[in-house]
Amino acid sequence: HEKIASCLIKKQATCKTQHHLLQEFLAKRREESVPLYNLVSLLSINSNEATEIQDCMEQTNKESTRTAMLLGKLTLGSSPNLKWSSYLNILTEMPSTMKKKQALIQEQKNRIDTANARHEALALQIEEMKREQQTLKQEVSDLEESIEESTKILDIWEAFREEKLPTVMQSVQSAAEVEQKLANDLMAQIKKDPSALAALSDDQSENPKLSLVFNMAGLTEDVITKLSSVSGEEFLLLTSLRGSDYDLGFHEQKDLEYCRTMLDCGQFPYESHKDQCVVCCCETEEELWNLLDEHSDDIDVSVLNLEMLKSHSITGPRALVLTRADMKSPLNCGTETKITKAIRIVLYLQRLHRDSLKN
């Protein structure tokens, strides 16, 4: 009896230990079980169904599951709508469902990338369209302004056409005919003998007037009037002719000297020559100074500067006829050494000028 009692006590202790271990195992299973909200979202079921599946997960074998169903802990469905078969189908399809979900996620990411790329492209297009819109707005404004100006001109034209055009046409036609005859006669005389050009005040000679040369050279009406008594012979042959004798300004004297030089060498009129000569094409002080600066390696230009050229209106053609006396006054170059350097610059420009005459 004692042995039997001892054996029963040991067995009871073992059962208690096994029961304790089972309770620990179930508690651990509950701790490791999937949270309720995960089952709801994963399986697309309600919270009651998720709770029941968690209760099922606590059952360790079929026997305990059977017991739970017998006790009503796990509810049953009725044939043919068996509840746990339905749950099994859901769980069986989960890998496929999750795979589809992964594919859907990738597809959605791709669509996001496509949408973002399209958004950026549209943003660039919008900016471009805004710029184009601004350009078009400015173009419309300019066109409207042009239309307004043109409309004003058309209004003026209508009045002019009715009141003045016939008279103006007649006057301009007459001027064109006179200009053509004067120019033809002048060029013929220059080609024959420019010294035979008559003074403007000479009413006896039938030869073309020297004043036409001055006119073509761009001299003013005031200068032409002051030189009205000068003939072609005096102008070309008497070097004693000085602008100061006729109350001419410095730049007018230099223009007159340049005109005489070009007429004497057969280069009048000299528009075509200016297109070929690097000196004569310098119509402003800045252009002449740029030319001197370009050639500063070949000639010392330190005695001159742009301010000096501007103060005396020295252009390319006028520089060609500067004299030693001009370097003293009005240019005020300074010492004889500086004046000599300035004359060397003039001689250098004259060489460039003569080279163009050879071509």
Image: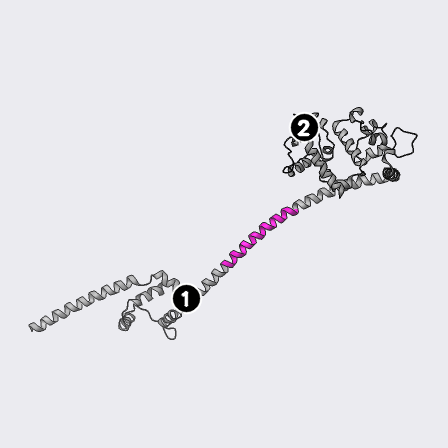
User: In terms of secondary structure, where does tag 1 sit?
Assistant: helix
Q: Position of residue 240 (x, y in %)?
A: 80, 26
Tell me which numbered mark, 1 or 2, is placed earlier along the sequence.
1
Residue at the location (85% across, 31% down)?
Answer: 233
| Amino acid on which the number 2 mark rests in the picture | Ile
Residue at the location (65% across, 28% down)?
Answer: 338
The quarter of the picture where residue 48 lies is bottom left
Q: Give yes or no for residue 137 being in the magenta stretch.
A: no
For the residue pair 153 and 200, the one nearer the viewer reads as 200
| Amino acid on which the number 1 mark rests in the picture | Met
Tag count in the figure? Answer: 2
Residue at the location (21% across, 65% down)?
Answer: 21
Report the residue marked by disc 2.
339
Q: Give yes or no for residue 117 being in the magenta stretch.
A: yes
- Distance between the Cα atoms at labels 1 and 2? 101 Å
Q: How is the image coloured?
A: one colour
The quarter of the picture where residue 77 lies is bottom left
Mark 1 closeness class: few <14, some 14–19, many ≥20 residues within 10 Å: few
Q: Position of residue 103 (x, y in %)?
A: 45, 65
Q: Position of residue 319 (x, y in %)?
A: 72, 33
Residue range of the region highlighted in magenta in the rendering: 113-136
Residue at the location (9% across, 73% down)?
Answer: 4
Q: Is residue 167 left or right of residue 22?
A: right
Q: Secondary structure of the magenta portion, mostly?
A: helix
Report the residue marked by disc 1.
98
